[in-house]
Amino acid sequence: MTWTYKDEPVDEVDPSFIGFVYCISNVIDGRKYFGKKKLTFKKTSIKTVKLKNGTKRKKKIRSNVPSDWDTYYGSSEELKADVTKLGKENFTREILRFCKTLTELSYYESKIQFETDCLLYPDKYYNAWISSRVRRDHMLKSC
């Protein structure tokens, strides 16, 4: 199954966004999982460079690498086991919100998780924990 946003399939994402908040739903029993996914991640590689004086030195090179967002089915082991057991065709993947900052991404993921009380209803939600740190001044900058 592909990701959808406002009932439209998503093949590409505007590069001004760093990630999205999503809901994966089991169409058989209705259980849901709320999470966030970054579109890229920073990868560090070591490169040996030759200096002008002839000596060699190792240098860290950081680059942005695309994530596996298009094939991603959440970080919940229980959800991933159900996807394997029941098949991808029995799950829908919906993007709820695109985000431009990490703070915004964490805030809106936590917000939907708290609003739904997903930890209190294991028969309705796959979510087993909520973890986030969000600073007000970072959030106000992104709005």
Image: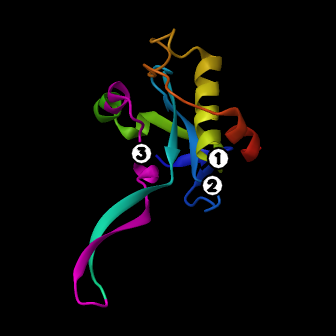
Quarter of the figure with residue 41? bottom left
Seen in the picture, residue 105 relative to 12 is either above or below; the reply is: above
Magenta highlight on residue 65: yes
Judged left or right of residue 143, residue 79 is left
Dot 2: few (<14), some (14–19), or many (≥20) neighbours within 10 Å?
A: some
What range of the chain is rendered magenta? 52-80
Three-letter amino acid code of the residue under disc 2: Phe
Q: Position of residue 107 (x, y in %)?
A: 63, 33
SS at circle 1: strand
Q: How many numbered marks have been drawn onto this rendered protein structure?
A: 3
SS at circle 3: loop
- Which residue carries the number 3 mark? 72
Seen in the picture, residue 60 relative to 67 is either above or below; the reply is: below
Quadrant location, the C terminus: top right
Residue 80 seen anywhere in this rendered image of the structure? yes
- Which residue carries the number 2 mark? 17
Disc ID at residue 98 = 1
SS at circle 2: loop
Q: Position of residue 119 (x, y in %)?
A: 50, 14
Give the CA distance from mark 3 to mark 1.
16 Å
Residue 95 seen anywhere in this rendered image of the structure? no
Question: Mark 2 vs mark 1: which is more N-terminal?
Answer: 2
Dot 3: few (<14), some (14–19), or many (≥20) neighbours within 10 Å?
A: few
Query: Who is closer to the viewer here, 80 or 37?
Result: 37
Q: How is the image coloured?
A: rainbow
Judged left or right of residue 136, residue 120 is left
Question: Do the CB atoms of the residues marked 2 and 1 lie less than 8 Å apart?
Answer: yes
